[in-house]
Image: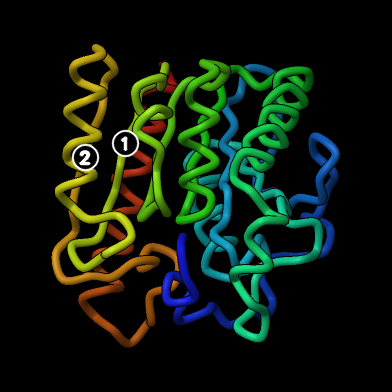
Amino acid sequence: MSGPECCANPPTIGSGGNDDQIQEIGGLKSYTSGLLIPCNPALILIADAFGYEAPKLRQLADKLSEAGFYVVVPDFFNGDPYTPEKQLASWFPNHQPGKGCEDARKIVADLKSKGASAIGAAGFCWGGMAVSKLSTYGEIEAAVILHPGRLSEDDINATKVPTAILGAELDEHAPPDQLKKFGEILSANSVDNFVKIYPGVVHGWTVRYKDDDEHSFKCAMESHLDMLNWFTKYLKK
């Protein structure tokens, strides 16, 4: 995520879920969906720079919870998400994906202490970078990275968990050729992976699609199903 253009088309922030779905998980205020019962798998969704209040992200959390997962969407920005009025160049240094990774590890530990049988993590743009780093620790069972910001090849080389990478055909921040190369690196390291490029969509489409854009909506729904299938494969054994 190297410039403001990466954060074009911000989501409309409105109601998304109920206040009683906000809990503290791993020290962070989090939107939660579903029930965390012993031996049930859990998912962590790491938002893009616009933060955990985005309605479509919370709707996705609810959709995944209906499939039997306990879903947590933490506020990794502690009430300071990016907004178009802010300068990304000054916002980003105070919200590094590496810090997000360390916070995510605390959430993983908290979920395990509460009895989660297996944990997966999905990240969008900024969150994709955090999930990529999280995957190097081997503390989760599976990862999904969606239209990420700039990924580190070192992190990809160090990835220890099965990883799906879902990208947009029209994305200069995560070009399809680069994402396919990451898949080749994972395969060379004997890490199961799935790389898919969705045609005709742009960066951020999975949680920033417009309901009246038939193609983007269809691709977003397809990406959600691909994510669900990946997590079901590795977390519900």
* Residue 177 at x, y percent in the picture: 15, 48
- Say which residue appears at 65% left-offset and 42% top-offset: 100
- Say which residue appears at 44% left-offset and 22% top-offset: 236
- Say which residue appears at 30% left-offset and 41% top-offset: 165
Circle nearer the N terminus (2, 1): 1
Q: Is residue 215 above or below residue 21?
A: below
- Say which residue appears at 24% left-offset and 60% top-offset: 168
SS at circle 2: strand
* Residue 25 at x, y percent in the picture: 80, 39
Work out whether residue 140 or residue 81 is closer to the camera in this orientation and state it: 81
Q: In which quarter of the image is residue 192?
A: top left
Q: In this view, does 143 lie above or below 139?
A: below
* Residue 54 at x, y percent in the picture: 60, 69
Q: Quote the CA–CA distance across marks 2 and 1.
A: 6 Å
- How many numbered marks have been drawn onto this rendered protein structure? 2
Q: Name the disc covering residue 35, or none.
A: none
SS at circle 1: strand
Q: Which amino acid does label 2 sit on?
A: Val
Q: Is residue 99 left or right of residue 185?
A: right
Q: Is residue 188 left or right of residue 95?
A: left
Work out whether residue 139 or residue 230 is closer to the camera in this orientation and state it: 139
Q: In this view, does 217 lie above or below 30?
A: below
Dot 2: few (<14), some (14–19), or many (≥20) neighbours within 10 Å?
some
Contact (Cβ within 8 Å) of mark 2 with mark 1: yes
Q: Is residue 190 left or right of residue 131?
A: left
* Residue 219 at x, y percent in the picture: 25, 64
Q: Name the disc covering residue 195, or none.
A: 2
Q: Which amino acid does label 1 sit on?
A: Ala
Report which residue position mark 1 lands on. 164
